[in-house]
């Protein structure tokens, strides 16, 4: 089961990226979580470059999503929304359709009590436009994230690990159910 993990943060010390890296360590044995590392180099979306002149890294992104059994997106919140770089990534996939019926776990994390709920809501709204299958049981808003990381920026809170394990199990279940329906 191949899972593509997308962090909405470009910060090398990102808490959202730390969550995804931790998820890759504690995920079910059947899962292989690969971190997407191309967010920073994606060009700005423009419809005239959508197909005929689409950049190579956009083609690679589309291929990675297409080949993935599921996707996890973990986003910070900037000014009550998801970062523009993450919205830009999603814009590149609107017409090409790789997210159609793709099981997706939508996560957000923030130092605040809200857990980035507004960014999360916007992320889910856009994924619904892309007709992704946003797995409800795998959705997470993660509050107070700074208190749940150790001094090296790694996830150290057992309760967070447990939440992540439940969300990953729900994503795996959705993927397996989809496979059963197709076969
Ligand atoms: C310009 C800016 C705007 C921000 N706006 C919000 C916000 O609206 N809501 C929120 O919960 N946190 C906000 N934050 C704080 C981020 O949640 C925090 O920096 C977080 O650590 C970013 O995620 P990362 O560690 O994965 O990079 C903002 C931070 C910056 C720099």
Image (cartoon, rainbow, N blue to C red):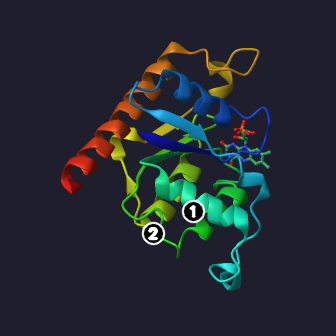
What residue sits 48% from the left and 53% below the top?
67
**Element type where label 2 sits in the image:** helix
Residue under label 1: 62
Q: Residue 91, position in %: x, y?
A: 61, 69
Q: Is residue 46 above or below residue 125?
A: below
Q: Is residue 111 visible?
A: no
CA gap between label 1 and label 2 equals 17 Å
Q: Residue 16, position in %: x, y?
A: 64, 36
How crowded is the residue under tag 2: few (<14 C-alpha within 10 Å), some, or many (20+)?
few
Pointers 1 and 2 in contact (C-beta within 8 Å): no
Tell me where residue 81 sits by quadrant: bottom right
Mark sitting earlier along the chain (1/2): 1
Q: Is residue 5 above or below residue 159?
A: below
Residue 147 versus residue 40: which sits nearer the camera? 40
Q: Is residue 4 visible?
A: yes
Residue 3 versus residue 167: which sits nearer the camera? 3
Q: Is residue 96 above or below residue 111?
A: below
What residue sits 69% from the left and 85% below the top?
48
Residue under label 2: 129
Q: Is residue 32 above or below residue 39?
A: above
How crowded is the residue under tag 1: few (<14 C-alpha within 10 Å), some, or many (20+)?
some
Say whether residue 160 is left or right of residue 155.
left
Tell me where residue 132 sits by quadrant: bottom left
């Amino acid at each position: 089961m191949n899972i593509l993990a997308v962090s909405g943060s470009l910060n090398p010390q990102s808490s959202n990226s730390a969550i995804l890296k931790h998820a890759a360590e504690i995920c079910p044995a059947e899962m292989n979580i690969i971190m997407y590392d191309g967010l920073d180099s994606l060009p700005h979306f423009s419809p005239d470059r959508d197909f005929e002149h689409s950049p190579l890294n956009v083609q690679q992104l589309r291929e990675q999503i297409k080949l993935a059994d599921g996707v996890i997106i973990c986003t910070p919140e900037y000014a009550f929304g998801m970062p523009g770089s993450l919205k830009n990534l999603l814009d590149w996939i609107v017409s090409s359709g790789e997210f159609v019926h793709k099981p997706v776990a939508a996560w957000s994390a923030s130092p605040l009590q809200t857990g980035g709920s507004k960014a999360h809501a916007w992320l889910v709204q856009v994924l619904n436009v892309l007709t992704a299958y946003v797995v409800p049981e795998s959705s997470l808003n993660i509050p107070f994230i700074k208190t749940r990381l150790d001094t090296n920026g790694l996830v150290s809170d057992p309760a967070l690990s447990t939440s992540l394990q439940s969300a990953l199990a729900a994503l795996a279940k959705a993927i397996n159910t989809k496979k059963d329906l197709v076969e």
